[in-house]
Every structure is written in structure tokens, then in C-alpha cells.
Image (cartoon, helix red, strand yellow):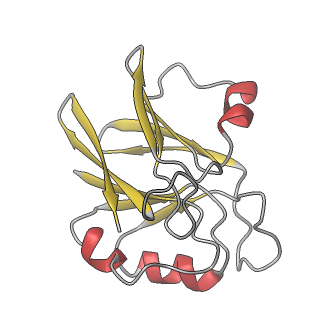
Amino acid sequence: MLVGVISDTHGVLPTSIHEVFADAERIIHAGDVGSQAVLDELESIAPISAVEGNTDAGWQRTPLPGRLTVTVGGARFHVGHKLPDLIRAGIPGDADFVIYGHTHVAAARDIDGVWYVNPGSAREPRDGRPPSVALIEITGDRRSVRHVYL
């Protein structure tokens, strides 16, 4: 199973997103979505789970949660916009992945069997790299994370 992870779109999706997420069976957006059009376009690719970021307010058809936990391919994803807020609220003990955004810097690290993944910003990266997203592959008990630079 392939999961596409995106964050900090701020109302605009890169044109390559359909190609990059073409094989994704689920998309997770870690906040600062920016517009209903972004959610609608991502939903046209695959089912989407999204959280509200600090710049999201008032435009949603249905309000987005501040954080959520979703199971995809047998793996548990705990999703929020800011990592410190997720940690402060408590990471569930059964989480396989903690997905966050906000920093606009791509990162992925395995800490004691839990992957902490920031896809970077699909629109405005801050680390001198191009815009990015992440792809998470789940095959049985094996999990892998890779960033795709757009």
C-alpha cells in the first residue's frame, strides 16, 4: 500500500501532484491546506485525511480536526500540523507514524520504531530544496519512507 503525504500547500497544488500520487491509495495532508479546491483535487486522486494548520480558517466545507489518528494498510498514523503540539497532547502508544508539517522542512526519522515524517512544503520550502511531498510504502510489517522533490 502506498500513502501520499503532503503539507503546507497554502491553497496551491503543484502540477505534478497527480503523477506523484497516482499510485497512492490514501493521501494525508498535515495542515495549512489553504483552500477547499486543494482538498477536492487531492480527493480526485485518492481518499484524503486532513488536519487543520495554523493558517487554515473559515474556508472549509466541513471543519478540519486539529489532529487525527487513521489506520491505513494496518499502520496507525497520528497526524497534526505542529509536532510540539502532537507531543504535548500525547503520541498514542500504538502509532506507527507521526505525520506533521509547519516547518516547511522535509524530514523522516525512525525513533524507537515510530516514524516521524514531515513531507516538507509542497509550495514554499525553507531549507533551500525544491518543494516536496513524502511517499510511505507499507508491505506487511515493512514500512519505508521517501521524499519526492517536485
Question: Residue 58 in the image: x percent, y percent?
Answer: 82, 76
Q: Is residue 36 above or below residue 20?
A: below
In the picture, measured across the screen, residue 144 lies left or right of residue 125, that is left
Query: Which residue in the rendered view is the most extreme toward the front?
Result: 128
Residue 96, relative to residue 148: is it above or below? above
Q: Please state which of residues 95 and 34 is positioned toward the viewer in this rendering.
A: 34
Total residue callouts: 0
145 or 86, which is in the foreground? 145
Q: Residue at x 41, y 29 (%)?
A: 109
Give how far across and how far down residue 98 sits, in percent. 51, 35
Residue with the most extreme right position? 58
Image quarter where the C terminus lies is bottom left
Quarter location, residue 51 = bottom right
Residue drawn at x 35%, y 36% as measured from the top left: 75
Spot occupied by residue 15 in the image (x, y as percentages of width and height): 38, 84
| Residue drawn at (28%, 69%) of the image | 20
Q: Is residue 135 left or right of residue 58?
A: left
Residue 99 at x, y = what percent?
A: 51, 42
Q: Nearer the viewer, residue 118 or 57?
A: 118
- Looking at the image, residue 111 sits to the left or right of residue 21; the answer is right
Quarter of the image for residue 85 reads top right
Does 4 appear above or below 35?
Answer: above
